[in-house]
Each structure stands twice: as C-alpha cells, then as structure tokens.
Image (tube, helix red, strand yellow):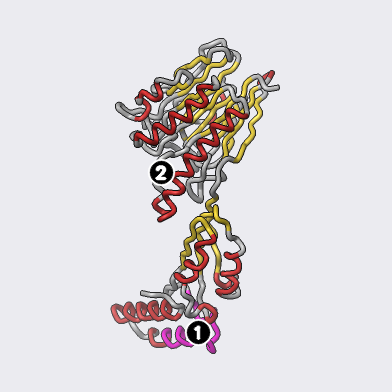
Amino acid sequence: MPLLRILHTADVHLGATFGFLGARGREQREQLKATFSRVVGLAIDAQADLVLIAGDLFHTAYPGTSLVSEVAYQLGRLDKEGIWTLIAPGTHDPWREGGVYENPAFRSLPHVHVFREQDLTAFPIPGLDLVVYGAAWWGERRDPLAGFRPDDEARFRVGVLHASIRLPGRVEEDDTWVDRSSIAASGLRYLALGHWHSLAEYSSGDVVAFYPGPPEPLGPESGEGKVLIVELGEEGKVDVRPVRVGRRRFLRLDLDGPDLVGPEDLYARLRGMADEDLALTVRIRRAWGESWIGVDWEEMEEELAPLFFHLRLEVQAPTTGSIRAEDYPESTVIGRFIRVAEREMSGLQGEDLQVAQEALRLGLFHLVGGDD
C-alpha cells in the first residue's frame, strides 16, 4: 500500500475560447469544465491525499464570475473529503493583484492553498508528514530550483512548478525554466511540472519529475488528456500512473496526392475515421493530375464534417515550382499545358517572365478545380 497518493494535473485552461474550432468552440470550452469535474471525482474515488495543479488552471488571470464559482464548487468537493489542493499559478493565470486567486471563494476553503511567491516556499500538510514546495510564475527568466535545498525534517518532500526544462540545443531558456541538474540536486521525492502540453518524464538523479499534459486536449499538440496518479512508498519508491480523463481527440493528418488513388480513395479513408469526438485537420499535398480535376473541396468537407467533432481540409494549391512536366504524361491535360507553357517561357526575361509564371500558376490552380 502506498504511504501517500497524489493526483497531479496542469494546464487545464478553463475559459479557453477555441476560436479555431468555429461553432464547436463553445462545446469544447464546456468540455473543459466537465473534464475538470471528472478529475475531481477521480481524486475522490482514488482516495488521494492531495491534488497538485501545476499552473494554468484558468486561461486568464481574470476569468468570469460563473467560471470561478464552478471551480470553487469543484474544489469544495475535495475540501469536504479532506483532500488538499495546492496550486502553482502559471503563465496564463499568474498571481496578480485583484486576480482570480485573490477571490474569497478560494480563501474560504481550508484545504486549498495557492503559492504566491516567485521563490519556492514550503507548505507543510498536517497529518501527512509531507512538505510541498511551490512557486508562482512571475515571468522572470530564472531557475527557481537553482541552489534550492529543503529545510525540513518531513518524510516526504514534493515540488510543484510551472516551468520549462532546459534542454541544450532544443530549449535553452524560457520565462521560467529549470535545469535537470537543479532537479537532481533538489532533494525532492517528486516534482510536479506544468507548462508543456504533453505527457513527459524528466526525472533526474533520484528525483521523479513529470509533465501530465492537459486533462482535456487543447489542440493537436496537447496529448491525449491524462492526469497522473502518483504514489509514494517506502525507501524512496515512486509509482506514476497516467489515467485518461479527456473526451476529445485532436489529430493533424498529412496526405500526399500521389499516394492516393483519387478523391474516392481520400473520401473513403476519412469516412473510415469518423468519430464524433475527433477534431481532425487534414493537409493534402500535391492533389494534382487528371483524377483530381474538378474536385469540390468545400463540398467534400461539408459532406464529411457531421461525422466528426470538427473537420478541416487544407489543400495545397499548385505553384510553378511544385509541378514538373515529367510527373505528368504529355497525353494528359496538365502535362500538355505545362510543356506548352515552358516552351513559351523559355525565351522570356524580366517582367515578361514574371507575367508568364503567374499565368502558369493560375492555369494550374484552375485545372485542379481551385478558385482564385
């Protein structure tokens, strides 16, 4: 049996607008609240000792009154069960004077604590032999773990931060970042991280460190919608278990025209992926040639869209440099058009050549059914 059980989440982004989803944006905004309620229910069912929220619980530091009331209600469910909630404000919901974390609804819950300082500060949890070290995001370029050493005699030490990891050659710095050597030297048992929108482990030395990603996906790069159940046991043992709680899925699919038989093949592929909880963006490159002439892309999108939560088709328009004559037989319309145009352009220079290239581009665009 674990000695301590933690639910770790981050980057909930309650109140996000999802403008890129068009008319479905409001539904996904409501789904974020439903998923957060599910996270609270999971913490209660799992008999967690505490919930750590590593930044960006809200999408802004000044959310609407109704949204704050909803979050206070959900945290109240944890409070009634005696489950602690510790929050490290992030880049979207930083600690600000008059901001959301000064709302009386948060101060009225005895089992809720929000870290306000930019330096790591200790918060002992009564009855658990645990100290949680956390800091609020303030936008200063610094490593809050640099030189940090815990000053307590508690059995368990846990940290919670909203920050990037410094990765040489990939991520050199951010507004707030931590170096892996700082993690290793911190003396913590577990470090709960937020800010990066995918599940990832950055354990260093004896310190286990994770990003959970958002509990409800926010876009194609935001993971699968999970939280982490973290169990601390004897002799430094740490068990981390991802649990999926999100409903929607976001996917970006790249397809190449030459790999498809034609529009019927494309339609069949997308039709086979139908999922009312999938937001799908399809980028179609080089859909040129005889089989693609006259395709009504808007009509195809409208026909398939009701089968998905959201669907967008992005079709790459041809340019003078992206189609070669050798790719198309001379017996085809496009092949013949390109060869005639290239012969006509062979002796042109300057402005005359530019005009001819633009004419070729427009001709190719209309041959594949585009609208200029």
Q: Which residues are magenta?
A: 323-342
Horizontal and vertical percent for residue 257? 55, 71
Depth check, front residue: 245 or 60 = 245
Question: Who's the residue at 44% across and 73% down the image?
Answer: 318
Q: Circle 2 sits on which residue? A: 16
Horizontal and vertical percent for residue 104? 36, 23
The local secondary structure at tag 1 comes to helix
Question: Who's the residue at 61% across and 31% down the image?
Answer: 229
Residue 92 lies in the magenta-colored region: no
Q: Circle 1 sits on which residue? A: 335
Q: In the rendered structure, which amino acid carries the disc numbered 2?
A: Ala
Q: Earlier in the sequence, mark 1 or mark 2?
A: 2
Mark number displayed over residue 189: none
Q: Residues within 10 Å of mark 2 (few under 14, many from 20)?
A: some
**Taking 26 as reference, is 4 above or below it?**
above
Q: In the rendered structure, which amino acid carries the disc numbered 1?
A: Gly
Query: Which quarter of the picture shows residue 48?
Result: top right
In the rendered image, the quadrant that contains the C terminus is bottom left
Depth check, front residue: 163 or 199 = 199
Horizontal and vertical percent for residue 321? 44, 73
